[in-house]
Every structure is written in C-alpha cells, then in structure tokens.
Amino acid sequence: MTEVLFYHLERASLEDVLPGLLEKTLERDWRAVVRAGSRERAERIDAHLWTYRDESFLPHAAGDDGAGQPIWITDGNATPNDPQILFLVDGAAADAGALNGLDRCVMIFDGRDDEAVADARTFWTAVKDVGCAATYWKQSPEGRWEKQG
C-alpha cells in the first residue's frame, strides 16, 4: 500500500524544503520523480538543485529522458526511472488509483494558496478512497515537521 504524505508549507518555501526531502530519499537508496505543475517550474527546480548549497550535490536530470536517473524532474506523468517515491509540487496532480507500485507519494503544497489547499484536500479524499495511508505534516514555529492528527 502506498503511503501518501501531505506537507503543508506555511513558513518555508518549496526551494527550502524539497532538497532536504530529496537528500533523505537518496539516503534510502530510493529513486524519485519530482512532478511540477508546469515545464517552467520544473526547469526552475532543476536549476535550484544545482545551486541550493555549495557543499551538497543531488544527482538529477530534467527534461525528456529520466531513465536511470536517481531524481528526475518533469511536468509529465511518465516515470522512466522506476521510482519508489513521487513528489507532487506546485500544482502537479496524480491519479490516486495509479499510485500502486510506489512506496510513497509526497504532495507539497503552499498553505497560503487557497487553490493549492483545495487541491490537497481533494487529493487527500481520493487517496483515502483507494485505500492509501495518508498523513498530514505541518511545520512547527521552530521549523520542524510535525505529524498532525
């Protein structure tokens, strides 16, 4: 059964949060797909992962060929690198019924964007309806992620 995590951004930006989650993904020896809501956003995420921290490197690729890549960034639905985890960011969507085969799906959404919150609620209902385990995570005032109810 696929575990679906919902990360509600209130204090940090996607650029602040995503690299750390991808580092943890690689520590597990998992492959990831980061699905963005648009080609432009996928390109910005790609550029950010090359420069987000001088002392770190996240092996990744973006564009049309993600086969063999530990992290593939796209705005499409294909998963050519056989990922264990799918990240949905910046308005990207997934069919809840198509999550089988993944260990985890992570939806990261901006809590200051009413449309993003509504999309997350809709996706929450959809993943629960197909039998996925879903958890909701919110940042504490200190910036740590805390599992909520």
Image (spheres, rainbow, N blue to C red):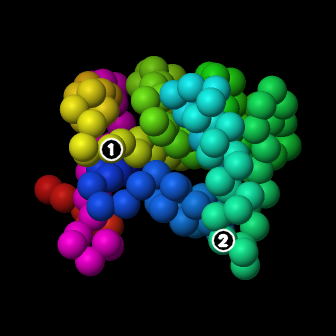
- Tell me the residue at 26%/77% (across/down): 142
Q: Based on the picture, tell me whether residue 29 belongs to the magenta stretch.
A: no
Which residue matches tag 1? 110
Q: Disc 1 vs disc 2: Cβ atoms closer than 8 Å?
A: no
Instruction: Measure how far apart labels 1 and 2 are at the Cα level.
Output: 23 Å
Q: Based on the picture, tell me whether residue 134 belongs to the magenta stretch.
A: yes
Which secondary structure lies at badge 2? loop
- Tell me the residue at 45%/25% (across/down): 93
Where does residue 33 sit, x and y in percent of width and height? 64, 40
Which residue matches tag 2? 53
Relative height, residue 122 to residue 9 (above, below): above
- Tell me the residue at 33%/44% (across/down): 110
| Any part of residue 119 in sight | yes
Where does residue 131 sit, x and y in percent of width and height? 32, 32
Where does residue 86 sit, x and y in percent of width and height? 56, 40
Q: Give the range drawn in magenta.
A: 126-144
On the picture, is 3 further left or further right than 112? Answer: right
| Any part of residue 100 in sight | no
Residue 63 vs residue 103, the one in the foreground: 63
Amino acid under disc 2? Arg
Q: Residues within 10 Å of mark 1 (few under 14, many from 20)?
A: many
Total marks in image: 2
Amino acid under disc 1? Asp
Figure quadrant of residue 115 = top left
- Tell me the residue at 62%/45% (across/down): 45
Figure quadrant of residue 109 = top left
Figure quadrant of residue 124 = top left
Which comes before the other along the chain, label 1 or label 2? 2
On the picture, is 124 further left or further right than 2? Answer: left
Q: Which of the image's four quarters has the N terminus?
A: top left
Q: Which of the image's four quarters has the C terminus?
A: bottom left
Where does residue 57 sit, x and y in percent of width and height? 75, 67
